[in-house]
Image (cartoon, grey):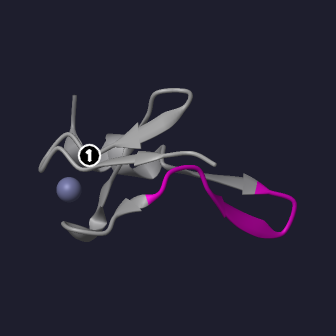
Amino acid sequence: MAEKARKARLYKLEGEKLVRLRQPCPRCGPDVFMADHGDRLSCGKCGYTDFKK
Ligand SMILES: [Zn+2]
């Protein structure tokens, strides 16, 4: 899978707003997005995990 195609899917256009579907990793920076596991978000790069409230 191409890296560019994957990044384009992280955003979706909802009306006039660009909605961010995923949270960027606080450790890796805004270019790395965290995977949604339902009750938590985790970074596949550094392993950082953030539990949802
Ligand atoms: Zn990370």
**Relative to 30, is 25 above or below?**
above
At which x and y percent is residue 33?
35, 53
Residue 22 painted magenta: yes
> From which residue to which does the magenta span run?
14-23
The residue lying toward the viewer, choosing from 40 and 11, is 40
Q: Nearer the viewer, residue 19 or 15?
A: 19
Task: List x then y, in percent, for residue 24.
Answer: 38, 62
- Residue 20, given in percent of the width and then of the height, sits at 59, 59
* Mark 1 residue's CB less than 8 Å from ligand 1: yes
Magenta residue check for 6: no
Q: Residues within 10 Å of mark 1 (few under 14, many from 20)?
A: many
Looking at the rendered structure, the secondary structure element under dot 1 is: loop
Extreme-right residue of the structure? 15
Picture quarter containing residue 44? top left
Q: Which residue is at the front of the view, 22 or 37?
A: 37
Q: Position of residue 39 (x, y in %)?
A: 55, 31
Q: Residue at x 19, y 66 (%)?
A: 28
What residue occupies the far left of the structure in this picture? 46
Nearest the eye: 29 or 40: 40
Placement of 37 over or under 41, stated as above or below: above
Q: Measuring 26% from the left and 46% from the top, which residue is drawn there?
A: 43
Amino acid type, residue under disc 1 in the picture: Cys
**Residue depicted at 48% across the width and 48% down the height:** 10
- Please indicate whether residue 1 sits to the left or right of residue 52 in the image: left
From the image, which quarter does the N terminus lie in?
top left
- How many marks on residues? 1
Q: Which residue is mark 1?
A: 43
Q: From what the image shows, is residue 51 above or below residue 16?
A: above
Ligand 1 picture quarter: bottom left
